[in-house]
Amino acid sequence: MSRVLSVEDLGIGFRSEGQDFTVVRDVSFSLEAGETLALVGESGSGKSVTSLGIIGLLPPPPQSRTTGRIVLHGGDGDIELLGLPEPRMRRLRGDRIAMIFQEPLTSLNPVHTIGDQIVEAIRSHRRVSRAKARARAVELLEQVGIPDPQDRLGTYPHELSGGMRQRIMIAIALALEPDILIADEPTTALDVTVQAQILDLLRRLQKDTGMAMLFITHDFGVVADIADRTIVMYAGQTVEEGRTETVLSDPLMPYTIGLMNAVPRLETAGLKLGDLKTIEGFVPDPAALPQGCSFHPRCAFMQEGLCDTSPPSIEDAGGGHMVRCKRWRHIGEERET
Amino acid sequence: MTADTPLIETVELKQHFPLRRGLFGGSSHMVRAVDGITIDIGRRSVLGLVGESGSGKSTFGRAVMGLETPTSGSLKFDGIDIARAGPEEMKAVRRRMQMVFQDPFSSLNPRMSVANTLSVPLRFHEPGLSRQARRDRAGEMLETVGLPARYIDRFPHEFSGGQRQRIGIARALMVRPDFIMADEVVSALDVSVQAQVLNLFAKLQREMQLTMLFITHDLAVVGHVSDHVAVMYLGRIVEIAPTRALFSQPYHPYTEALLSAAPTPAARDRKTRIVLEGDIPSAVNPPSGCPFRTRCPYALDACAEAVPELREVGPGHRAACIRDDLTLAAATGT
């Protein structure tokens, strides 16, 4: 596999009402061709902001500031995306990195037919005739499972169901065969049966094109379904990272353990096992992060004098399973008892 | 009424809406949002209602609350026929039925303090109470839903989503109802907050002996909170069963497809997943016969002939499918 993206020590901050606060801190990861990496976390974890930082869609400084490195590999050598002038970034966006969002209705232009929107997406990057672009549009619609693609070119977004609109967004995103597809909660607004269709579609397209996917979601069920590797984010940091099966079946960071316990399970439906285990408290305000580990005030395994003093660094717990917790070695034992 | 009669009974309840077509268009087309539902909700039990968008589950919830006049069929609350109840009787019924909504932000008045928000239902249903008495009750209720009583003079924007949902729940409980209709109440919440709110519902249901209709699209949530689960598709119940039976021995192919499509963190073989084709059909023009047949992997020609009746397939377990030769996949090991 070849590496298509490296993110090193990414930091993202915003300025609001004269105050600066950091919402993403020292996030590092890489993405290989053909693999799916999930960024999972609750609201305020920094997962979406990370993805917007990569594709260069954050407000310009001084409203936001981004530090670290974001490097796009392959093609004609490495490109450092951070600090890239906007015209160059615009050429890469859609072409090398594409993105789909949760709500396709707001991402599609309501006054243009879907055919025109796909043609526009192609012709803004490639010097091809309108006819050629239309032919490619038909091909794309077919690829994303839209029946009668030729006839569908003339329809408007509002005439389509949510699932169909998401397919159109995927068609537009794939029009230029990007190396990387960033998918930000693309199935969250969809019904479960339609969600299953879209996840299957993305998996199939990835197999056909070899693109890498960065998949942002809050849903561990979706993570289990789509991702090869998983990063769990909390308060702007990576707190756990590893192969998806490992992270989900053997989580080491207390936050991940807490989330996994808090989700009701299909497998135990109707057994009346009593209360769900909860994580007490709230995600901290980015302007007032706790000292030490940012999760320690909510952590069931917190040790005074250790967790509330200095921030933990991320450690390899074996086989690339990374965990940001000073006590991960003890947590396995404590969970047993 | 005796304790063993259901608190809520609907018989062939239908809720159709005319579809306006243009300025002078007649209303020849009807949206069959709820198309003949017969169910009971037993006292102090939780009925979960699952379905996808367009299934009619929220419309059914509104119909049960008496917020719509049914097109046909009947609705009884504690033996009282809602269609025939007089104004006084109806006012008493309204106090006993309350609801909680999905979006706690838009359902709370941003300009009203918590004390005021919680007092409104009391002013209507218990007009004899003094201002101080209402305020005391509001403070107690805040504690009941897990918020400090000192938050009583705060406004909605000062609370997080989970806290706002607690206030929505507190408002519903102020008049000591017997029945709560909860429509997608945890859908907008993060996982860790969702668990807190689900635990709160369980506690309140137990302590206040509530009967609940819990509407959601989330199967795992419904499996956690409900005693019985009903699955809706295109305005009809296609399967209803005690929760464990529904998840371990689904009988209707749509239930199987839903269970199979529901994402779960547990390791599962993707290849055996049933992925339905297409979208839910329009409720204006539902398919003839079984409403699910156009997407059903097991449909026969006979499925187009008549709408299948719900029939007994196990203890308290009914399904609307003419086939009895299927072995369907379950969400859980049996």
Image (cartoon, coloured by chain):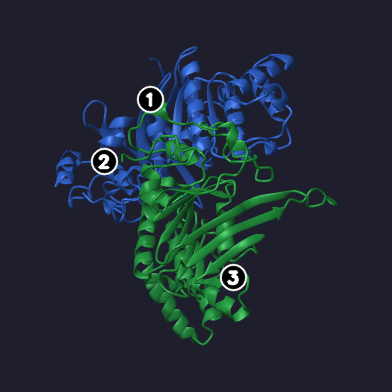
Chain colours: A blue, B green
Q: CA separation, marks 3 and 1?
A: 62 Å
* Residue B208 drawn above or below residue A216: below
In this view of the protein, which residue sits in the foreground, A337 or B116? A337
Question: Which comes sooner in the sequence, label 2 or label 1?
Answer: 1
Residue beneath label 1, please?
A30
Asked whether residue A47 appears in the rendered view, the answer is yes
* Label 1: chain letter: A
Q: Quadrant of residue B334?
A: top left
Which type of secondary structure does the marked residue at label 3 adopt? loop
Residue at the spot 52% in from the left edge and 69% down from the top edge: B77
Residue beneath label 3, please?
B82
Residue beneath label 2, please?
A253
Residue at the spot 68% in from the left edge and 24% down from the top edge: A148
* Label 3: chain letter: B
Q: CA separation, marks 3 and 2?
A: 54 Å
Which type of secondary structure does the marked residue at label 1 adopt? strand
Left or right: residue B199 compared with residue B71 = left
Residue at the spot 61% in from the left edge and 53% down from the top edge: B34
- Residue type, numbered disc 3: Ile
